[in-house]
Image (spheres, helix red, strand yellow):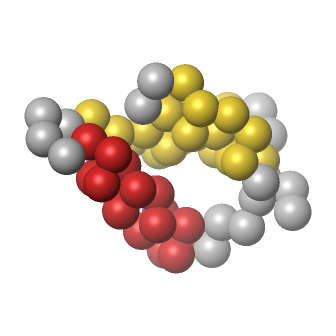
Amino acid sequence: MYSWLYHKDETIVVGTSSTQNLNQYAQEFLETVKNQYSLEGEEIGREGFSLHISKEK
């Protein structure tokens, strides 16, 4: 199980991997990242286990 967070252009990419309960783990990790970094951007796409969030409100 691992997670990642990186900035690309004007997008923040949040991703996760897990062997069990992937959807639950991914949602909990996303909520943690949003709260810790005060992310308020709009979700602009999903690719597999990655979520793309616009930096702009």
Count of labels shown? 0
Residue at (27% x, 35% y) in the render: 17
Check the picture and name the quadrant holding the C terminus.
bottom right
Q: x%, y% of residue 36?
A: 49, 74
Check the picture and name the quadrant holding the N terminus.
top left
Q: x%, y% of residue 45?
A: 68, 34
49 relative to 22 in the view: left or right: right
Q: Note whether residue 3 is visible.
A: no
Is 50 situated above or below 23?
A: above
Residue at (42% x, 68% y) in the render: 32
Closer-to-camera residue (39/43): 43
Residue at (42% x, 31% y) in the render: 49
Task: Kindly give the residue lying farthest to the top in the view shown.
Answer: 48
14 relative to 53 in the view: left or right: left
Q: x%, y% of residue 12?
A: 64, 44
Quarter of the image where one finds residue 4: top left
Quarter of the image where one finds residue 2: top left
